[in-house]
Each structure stands twice: as structure tokens, then as C-alpha cells.
Amino acid sequence: MDKPRAAGAVDFRGARWVAASAANYRRADRPADYPVDRVVVHVTQGGYASAVRAFQDPGHGAAAHYIVRRDGRITQLVRELDVAFHAGNREYNERSVGIEHEGFVEDPASFTEALYAASARLAAAICGRYGIPVDREHIIGHDQVPGTDHTDPGRLWDWERYLRLVGAERAGSPPAR
């Protein structure tokens, strides 16, 4: 059932591996166990180090697959094979990959050029891997997950810009400015 797993292996080249607590995700063999058809965009509401600490805390009850830092560096905490507890909805956890973004929903300085560009490369790779369309039905905010009360990524997240960047990365061409 399980695909081979190498310690420290990442699904996105260039990402740094930092393991989340096993209590914050469920081992699986996606997409064989559950088709992956969504990317869920999150904002940490804090700094990178505090998000990593939370995801490594077995009592936290949540972790995303990735965190994108303001400077564009990417950390993977849960393999895409596995079901990360990130969306607050079991079905959405099973069918999505969660990308956290370092920052605060009400701080526009959180959403840097480097963060958007790195996240777009990551999201495009995920979409390519699973055949996910690059649109707002399939790349969604945490606030769009049914049954949750989250507000991230918030009103300052530039969806038009983000989808343009993801689409350009997916097409292999530089985005129009």
C-alpha cells in the first residue's frame, strides 16, 4: 500500500524537510487512497518558527504540507502522499495539499514578491502532479473550506495575481507583469 519513503525526502525540489508531528497528519498513499483535486491557501498568523513549532507539537492537531516564508524559502512538513490535518474538514484534508504562508492576514507587507513567486512555483508543481486546474474552484482559501470559521488568507491576498503567477508557472512561461 505505502509507497517507499526516504527519510527527509521532499516532493518539491528545493524544499527543506522539517517533519511535523505524526499526530498532525495521517499516513496514506495519495492519490491512490484519495484523489487530490485542491490546493488550500493558508496564512500562519505568525512567524515561520512559531508555525513550525505548532506543527511539530502533537497537541496542536494540525499541520500543512508546506510553509512558504516571506523570503521565498519553502519547507515541507508532511509528504503529499499523506493527509495533513490543515483544512479543518476531513474530506478537504483528504483531497487537498495545504500551503501555509508566513505572515498575517491584515499585514500587506506579509505578502512579498518572493512569497508569491515561490508559492506560485509550488502550487503549479502540485497542480501539474495531480492534474488540478489553475482556477478559484481548485485553488482555494482556507476561508472557503466548508464547516470552518477561518479567515485566511484574507482580503489582502491578491488572488488575481496569484492565479496569474501559478498559471504562468504551469505553462512554463514568465508571467505578465
Image (cartoon, rainbow, N blue to C red):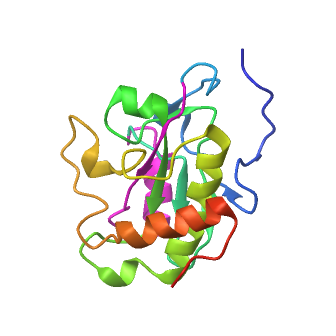
* Quarter of the N terminus within the rendering: top right
Q: Tell me which corner region of the image, top left, top right, bottom left or bottom right, holds residue 81.
A: top right
Q: Is residue 176 left or right of residue 106?
A: right
Relative height, residue 130 to residue 48 (above, below): above
User: Quick check: is 59 in the magenta stretch?
Assistant: yes
Query: Measuring 50% from the left and 36% from the top, which residue is drawn there?
Result: 37
Can you give x and y, in whole percent of width and height, for residue 154 in the image? 25, 64
Query: Measuring 28% from the left and 58% from the top, which residue is drawn there?
Result: 152
Can you give x and y, in whole percent of width and height, for residue 150 in the image? 23, 50
Which residue occupies the foreground of this view, 141 or 159?
Answer: 159
Residue 47, visible in the rendered structure: no
Q: Tell me which corner region of the image, top left, top right, bottom left or bottom right, holds residue 21.
A: top right
Query: Measuring 59% from the left and 42% from the top, which residue is drawn there?
Result: 78
Residue 21, visible in the rendered structure: yes
Can you give x and y, in whole percent of width and height, for residue 107 in the image? 28, 79
User: Quick check: is 91 in the magenta stretch?
Assistant: no
Relative height, residue 55 to residue 152 (above, below): above
From this viewpoint, which residue is outermost toward the top?
1
Can you give x and y, in whole percent of width and height, for residue 80 in the image? 62, 39
Query: Measuring 55% from the left and 53% from the top, which residue is drawn there?
Result: 66
Magenta segment:
35-60
Which residue occupies the foreground of this view, 59 or 95?
Answer: 95
Relative height, residue 20 to residue 82 (above, below): below
Q: Is residue 108 left or right of residue 113?
A: left
Q: How many circles with numbers are drawn on the protein?
A: 0
